[in-house]
Amino acid sequence: MKIKTRLRFLIFCLVTLVSSTTQAQSPDSLLHQLNLTTTVESRIPILKHIGEWYLSRQDTTAIRYFRELILLSDQSNDPLLKAYAYYRMGVSLYQQNDIKGSTASYFQGLESTKATSEYNELRARLYNALGWNFGLIGNHENSLRYLHQAELYASSENAQLMGLILNNKGVAYKNLKRYDSALLTFEKSLQFNRKVADTRQVRFNLNNMGSVMVETKRFKESKAYLREAMELNRKAQDTIEIVNNLINLSLVYVQEDSMWLSQSQLEEALRLAKQVHSLDQQRRVYFSLTNLSERQHRYEEAMSFQKEYYKLTDSLYRHEGIAKVMEAEAKYIGLRKESELQEARQRVVEQRFYLSIIVGLLLVTFIVIFFLGKMVRAKKANEQELIKLNTEIQKQSEELLRANKAITEANEALEQLVQYRSEVIQNQSKRISHFSFVNSHEIRGPLATLMGLLGLLYEEKSPAKREEILGFLKITSTKLDKVIDRVSRELEKED
């Protein structure tokens, strides 16, 4: 995730760099390409380039291209595009001194970000810009709060961004008259800016530290910081920062009772501020000129300066404008709270869903445990029944053995008897041959039945069936015995 984020911001920085190096070039060729391009993915980089080109020239035309990027963002694969476009549009509006429009655009950019680390660097830039805007309208508490948020989201690896945020945070501390915190924060910012050799931010740091020294009556140190900053600003030909230096130096000279030096610094600052059309700096110069004229008892001059100051204040920071800024903040906070409430509701729904799953799983577990218990009890009952049946079978086996023994003995006796009878019959064959022929089936029939029943008895496992077969054996044996007895008596009679 961090690699993807860095790649996206590297592309963003490259686009900005290319735009700054092509300020002298016309975007006509890019506009021509844009007119020929219809696909979203091919239009986006061209729109970015053109927007940055106009932004570098402080041309409001940039807003048009950033707005188109916002419209295309829903069709783009770049999740950062919408927030980026709102951020850059806010910068363009700020360049035109439209603080309320700029603030609203920054809040919309924040609303377009999501709760992932992928957005952290862009979120830090948006909070930093909001902190600066709230400082401009005099709401320094809110300014400090937003700058603190920016510092939390910024990565310490991005020294340039950290230097910028800490410088602005130091300004907020200074405006709240928390001078020790301001100096400490400026020192941290200076370390980051010198690390990346960002001379522009170093100049900001030196000038701001000098202004804090003025407020704390440390004029010697103040002049050292301000003169160093002035030297760097003149080398860089940064008129805006030169004006800030002149304003701060004028305050030092006032404290040293060098009114004419202070006057000359402010007049030069006013000339340069008008030259670069910096209305906010003109307003600050008129405020300082008013105070200086009052100290010198030039009240008519002080009144004229004061009129100019109020005129610029009304045009830049009307109460209506400040109210709009606060309204934009309230709207953003409301939307954020509504979003958080929606997320909380979603989490509750998800928790209920997972709770339902857990309850269902517990219910299924209880049912499975119940049936397993029932199966275990049934198994134990079956085992007991099986033991009982085995015992009965054992008993029946013993009885069967006894019955087999009796049958064997009976068979042996029967064979002896048959043998005896055979001998008698052989001796009397001539006398009873006719009689044996007639009655042999009466003896063989029961004997065959008896043998068949014995075979069934050996094969049968059921105790009841065995009892039944034994009954038939008894009947058949009795019948056989009667037949034999009858034949014997008849034979005896014959004898």
Image: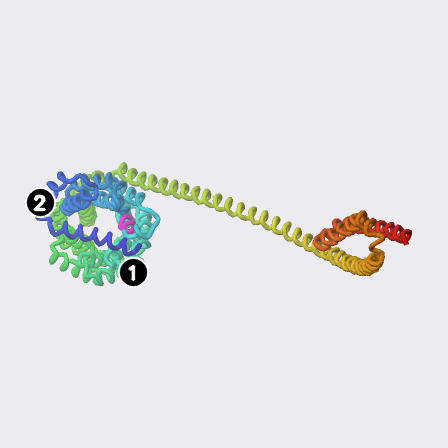
From the viewer's perspective, tell me whether residue 449 is left or right of residue 105: right
x and y percentages locating residue 165 in the rendered image: 27, 54
Tell me if mark 1 has few (under 14), some (14-19) or many (20+) residues whose alpha carbon lies within 10 angstroms of its own: some
Q: Is residue 312 visible?
A: no
Residue that label 2 marks:
26
Q: Nearer the viewer, mark 2 or mark 1?
A: 2
Magenta stretch mostly in which secondary structure?
Answer: helix
Q: Quadrant of the N terminus?
A: bottom left
Residue 77 position by quadrant: top left
Q: Nearer the viewer, residue 234 or 353?
A: 353
Residue 124 lies within the magenta run? yes
Type of amino acid at the residue the image marks with label 2: Ser
Q: Residue at the front extreme? A: 430
Callout 2–callout 1 Cβ contact below 8 Å: no
Q: Residue at the top extreme? A: 320
What distance separates the C-alpha of mark 2 from that of mark 1?
44 Å
Q: Nearer the viewer, residue 62 or 378?
A: 378
- Whichever of labels 2 and 1 marks the residue nearer the N terminus, that label is 2
Q: Nearer the viewer, residue 378 or 349?
A: 378
Magenta part of the chain: 122-126
Q: Quadrant of the C terminus?
A: bottom right
Q: Nearer the viewer, residue 413 or 24?
A: 413
Residue 389 position by quadrant: bottom right
In the structure shown, which secondary structural element does the residue marked by tag 1 occupy?
helix
Tell me if mark 2 has few (under 14), some (14-19) or many (20+) residues whose alpha carbon lies within 10 angstroms of its own: few
Q: Is residue 144 visible?
A: yes
x and y percentages locating residue 269 in the rendered image: 14, 50
Q: Kindly identify the residue that appears in the image at 22 percent across and 43 percent down.
A: 89
